[in-house]
Image: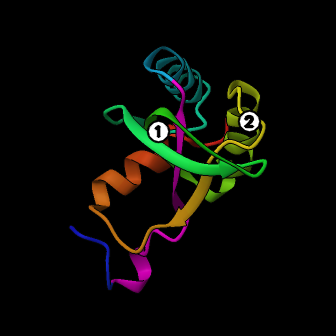
Amino acid sequence: MFTHGDAAAQPDDIVLVIGNAPDQLLAKRIAHVLVEEGLAACVNLGATGLSMYMWAGRLEGGEEVPLTMKTTRARVHELVARLQQLHPDEVPEILVLPILGGLTSYVDWVRERTALA
């Protein structure tokens, strides 16, 4: 069942965290650590792409691997702290987005995988 619109089953405790890593090797390491430590139920690694941004008054650019992480509000602060430890950038991209709905069985799985022991 899809949870959107069902107030009793709203997945408002589930969040999506997006970020990136400078290369595939570090992206895989980050994913392994976050999943093994139960901070993320799943981490998707996207195809390497080019990012352009201003830093210290200069236009910078470089290849990055996008990361999409699924977790709960109860674990998101731990996930963000751990991601900051693992990431080499001074200011890594870390954005937390709410989930409006989803497949009930998937939402339940995210909760189960990230449940506090």
Residue 97 spot, x, y in % from top left: 53, 64
Specify the quadrant of the image occupied by residue 6. Answer: bottom left
In this picture, residue 97 sits left or right of residue 78 = left
Q: Considering only vertical position in the picture, is 68 above or below 43?
A: below
Q: Is residue 68 visible?
A: no
Q: Which residue is mark 1?
A: 41
Q: At 48% across and 44% down in the image, what residue appears?
A: 51
Q: Residue 34 or 27: which is nearer the viewer?
A: 27
Whether the magenta-drawn stretch holds residue 8 is answered as: yes
Residue 8 spot, x, y in % from top left: 43, 80
SS of the residue at dot 1? loop
Q: Residue 83 or 10: which is nearer the viewer?
A: 83
Sequence-wise first label, 1 or 2: 1
Q: Magenta residues, as a range? A: 6-22
Residue 22 spot, x, y in % from top left: 54, 27
Estimate how packed mark 2 is, as few (under 14), some (14 to 19) or many (20 or more) residues with alpha carbons within 10 Å. some
Specify the quadrant of the image occupied by residue 86. Answer: top right
Tell me, what colour scheme is on the image? rainbow
Q: Is residue 30 visible?
A: yes
Q: At 75% across and 52% down in the image, what residue appears?
A: 57
Q: Considering only vertical position in the picture, is 1 above or below 64?
A: below
Q: At 52% across and 71% down in the image, what residue appears?
A: 12
Marks 1 and 2 in Cβ contact (< 8 Å): no
- The numbered disc on residue 84 is 2
Q: Considering only vertical position in the picture, is 97 above or below 22?
A: below
- Mark closer to the observer (1, 2): 2
Residue 46 spot, x, y in % from top left: 34, 36
In this picture, residue 88 sits left or right of residue 102 = right
